[in-house]
Image (cartoon, helix red, strand yellow):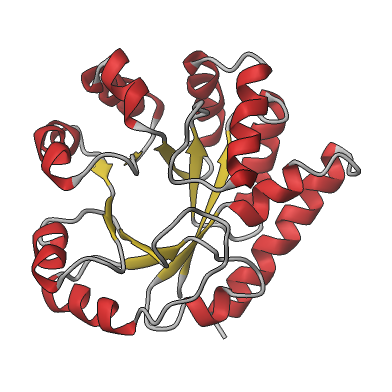
């Protein structure tokens, strides 16, 4: 059974909504939840997630809100914190590790932390029983792929194309997947540009998909009530889970 990872922005449109949405996605078949930590300069994210980040910050998002939401979500679904390195650096990785362990969070996704810098933090993360997710890009050489994936934990995040999330570009990922699987048995999940229309094709040859912008786009739709948003993202999640497994 191929896995579905869903990203939502913590605190948007509200903290209560984040918890309700997370629990609904779990019911809809999502296997792992990425709780996004709003940041003012989300360099890997496209305009959809960037807009949600900005709105959450304007609503007064604080890290305490991430912790509060996580405490209510982690008993129901495997949860990862997805954020940029700036907050981890300023608050201290050890503090994040301790808090994640306390709250039952399974690890971190930090897209702007390169392998060489991640190596400094990985031993502490893994000693706490957590995972720091590794990224592979289509531009990585076989030698670089081997270097990145040899000790990868939980899953490997395969970026579907060079660029930002949500743009829906397409590249042939099979040669990269072959190289990854040559050096690691860790599951490979593909992200960037995955939605209910592209998921089946993107899931070919990999073990799961990561979906963000398709969900956040619904959260940004001001024509929908909060309950309608939850119904819609649940429907999208069910459709994607079915398509990647048929």
Q: Is residue 162 visible?
A: yes
Residue at (54, 42) in percent of width and height: 76
**Residue in front for this viewpoint, 135 or 95:** 135
- Indicate whether 83 appears above or below 60: below
> Where residue 234 appears, x then y in whole percent?
72, 56
- Identify whether 146 is placed above or below 92: below
Determine which quarter of the picture holds residue 131.
Answer: top left
- Percent of width and height locating residue 196: 66, 70
Taking the image as shown, residue 230 lies to the left or right of residue 239, namely: right
Image quadrant where one finds the N terminus: bottom left
Q: Quadrant of residue 49?
A: top right
Q: Is residue 2 left or right of residue 230?
A: left
**In this view of the protein, can residue 11 be seen by the observer?**
no
Snapshot quadrant of residue 107: top left
Name the residue rendered at 19%, 34% in the picture. 125
Residue 39 in the figure: left or right of residue 22: left
Pick the residue in front: 232 or 78. Answer: 232
Percent position of residue 63, x then y: 47, 17
Count numbered badges in the picture: 0
Residue 7 in the image, given as x and y percentages of width and height: 54, 47
Q: Which quadrant is the C terminus positioned in?
A: bottom right
- Rendered view: 238 above or below 130: below
The image shows residue 244, relative to residue 28, as above or below, that is below
Q: Nearer the viewer, residue 64 or 222?
A: 222
């Amino acid at each position: 059974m191929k896995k579905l990872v869903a990203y939502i922005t913590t605190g948007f449109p509200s903290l209560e909504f984040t918890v309700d949405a997370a629990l609904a996605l779990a019911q809809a078949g999502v296997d792992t939840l990425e709780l996004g930590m709003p940041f003012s300069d989300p360099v890997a994210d496209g305009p959809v997630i960037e807009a949600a980040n900005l709105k959450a910050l304007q609503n007064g998002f604080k890290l305490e809100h991430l912790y509060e939401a996580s405490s209510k979500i982690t008993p129901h679904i495997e949860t990862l914190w997805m954020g940029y390195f700036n907050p981890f650096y300023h608050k201290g990785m050890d503090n994040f590790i301790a808090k994640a362990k306390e709250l039952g969070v399974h690890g971190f996704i930090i897209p702007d932390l390169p392998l060489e810098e991640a190596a400094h933090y990985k031993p502490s993360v893994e000693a706490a029983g957590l995972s720091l997710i590794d990224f592979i890009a289509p531009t990585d050489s076989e030698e670089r792929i081997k270097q990145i994936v040899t000790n990868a934990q939980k899953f490997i995040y395969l970026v579907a194309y060079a660029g930002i999330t949500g743009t829906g570009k397409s590249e042939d990922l099979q040669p990269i997947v072959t190289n990854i699987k040559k050096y690691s048995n860790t599951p490979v999940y593909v992200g960037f540009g995955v939605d209910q229309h592209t998921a089946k094709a993107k899931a070919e040859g990999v073990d799961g998909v990561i979906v963000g912008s398709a969900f956040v786009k619904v959260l940004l739709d001001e024509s929908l009530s909060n309950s309608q948003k939850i119904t819609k993202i649940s429907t999208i999640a069910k459709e994607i889970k079915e398509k990647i497994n048929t």
